[in-house]
Amino acid sequence: MQSLLPVVQALAQQVANQEHLDLVSVQWHTHQSPPILRVEVRHPSTDTSLDDCERMSRALESVLDATADLTCAYVLEVSSPGLSDFLTSDRDFSTFRGFPVRVTTTAPHRGKTLWEGNLVRRDEVNVYLSQKGRSLAIPRALIATVQLYTPPAEA
């Protein structure tokens, strides 16, 4: 099943593009009988609806049924990924403006690879945080992850 993953991912990407959805992930869950093919999609500009998932499911089902590569029985599940702690899209950065985030970098920036603060914004060059009222710009080229987090309560 895992050897079919690249084929299924390519087909799912084509269908997602046709349905104007973002493909988030494609996974085989082979510990079930029959195996489960889980596909996660996200609407690029609004909340992902049940209708979005249903459209993707019906369209992908037809494409998968027509491919000669997929001959075994499986269950297709299409869903939205839900809310992630990791911010990746412009929409995420806009939605969580003002929220506490933890930024990790691939290389030290000002001597550190871990930064915490409230998210101010993101542009083409930097991610901006506020740390106790002081602005900090972290180059996007250095950023590995931006994650929502809950700071420890002050005593």
Image: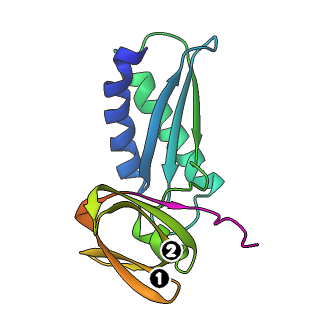
The x and y percentages for residue 116 are 49, 68
Secondary structure of residue under mark 1: strand
* Label 1 crowd (10 A; few <14 / some 14-19 / many >=20): some
Cα–Cα gap, marks 1 and 2: 5 Å
Residue at coordinates 62% horizontally, 58% vertically from top-left? 49
| Of residues 107 and 15, the one drawn nearer to the viewer in this rendering | 107
Q: Amino acid at mark 2?
A: Gly
Determine contact: label 1, label 2, CB under 8 Å.
Answer: yes
The x and y percentages for residue 34 are 61, 13
Residue at coordinates 61% horizontally, 52% vertically from top-left? 82
Q: Is residue 62 above or below residue 17?
A: above
The x and y percentages for residue 150 are 65, 64
Q: Amino acid at mark 1?
A: Ser
Q: Which mark is residue 38?
A: none
* Label 2 crowd (10 A; few <14 / some 14-19 / many >=20): many
Badge 2 is on which residue? 117
Q: Is residue 152 shown in magenta?
A: yes
The x and y percentages for residue 96 are 55, 73
- Residue 142 is left or right of residue 147, and the answer is left
Residue at coordinates 40% horizontally, 70% vertically from top-left? 90
Q: Quadrant of the N terminus?
A: top left
Q: Main secondary structure of the magenta part?
A: loop
Secondary structure of residue under mark 2: strand
Magenta residues span 145-155
| Of residues 87 and 146, the one drawn nearer to the viewer in this rendering | 146
Q: Quadrant of the C terminus?
A: bottom right
| Of residues 32 and 155, the one drawn nearer to the viewer in this rendering | 155
Q: Which mark is residue 130?
A: 1
